[in-house]
Every structure is written in C-alpha cells, then in structure tokens.
Amino acid sequence: MANKTVQLPNKRIIPLSSFFDRSLNVRTVLCNLISQEQRPLSDSELVDLLEEYGYKVARRTVAKYRAMEGILPAHLRQASS
C-alpha cells in the first residue's frame, strides 16, 4: 500500500495507509507471541521476534503495547506462571 492514495468525495487526496491501524496488527502479533512463549520473553526478545515477522518497532514501543494489552513484564509473568 506504499505510495497509494485515495480521493475522497470532497476531492481531498489522502494516503491509503491512513485507513489502517498498524499498531493493531503489531499488538495482535505481540499477544500471539506472548501466549505461545515457553518461558517469559523480555521486551528486547519480543522486538527481535517481531522483526522476523516484518515489524520494526522499538523496545519501548513493545513495552507500551504490552501494557496496553494488560500483559505483565517478563519478570512478573514468570512469577505468575
């Protein structure tokens, strides 16, 4: 969808990507990775796995999305499992 645009009825032209929430995709993959982990993965390890799926995000972004989903940090997930 890179470099694709859409013309709205009011004649305004906007990027097609503005209709999609990329963070929702990343958060879905992140939740799947965490639900399938054998041992709790750190945010840095999750960044590496997300990169394998084609998502380039910072460690702090992973921490933010994890918190938004109500998922504890690795050291606390380990204690609760």
Image (spheres, grey):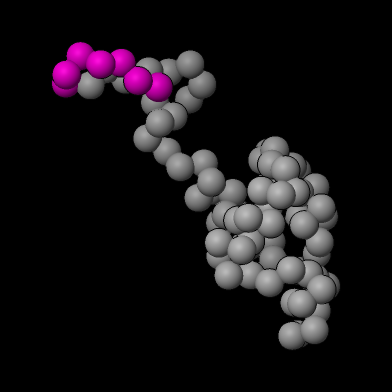
Task: Examine the rendering and report whether any part of residue 1 can be seen.
Answer: yes
The answer to whether residue 17 is left or right of residue 23 is left
**Rendered location of residue 70, percent (x, y):** 58, 70
In the picture as drawn, the residue positioned furthest to the left comes out as 9
Q: Residue at x 40, y 22 (%)?
A: 15
Return the x and y of residue 50 as percentages of the image width and height.
71, 48
The reply to whether the magenta stretch includes residue 58 is no
Residue for point 59% across, 49% down: 26
As drawn, 13 above or below 18: above
Name the outermost residue toward the bottom.
80
Locate the C terminus by quadrant: bottom right
Residue 74 in percent (x, y) is at 78, 69
Residue 8 left/right relative to 56: left
Instruction: Give the magenta part as a residue range.
Output: 9-15
Residue 10 magenta-highlighted? yes
Q: Quadrant of residue 30?
A: bottom right
Rendered residue at 75%/77% (across/down): 77
* 80 relative to 42, above or below: below
Left or right: residue 60 versus residue 10 is right
**Nearest the eye: 14 or 2:** 14
Whether residue 30 is visible: no
Residue, x 69% and y 66% (percent of image)? 34
Q: Does residue 70 appear to the left or right of 20 in the view shown?
A: right
Figure disc tally: 0
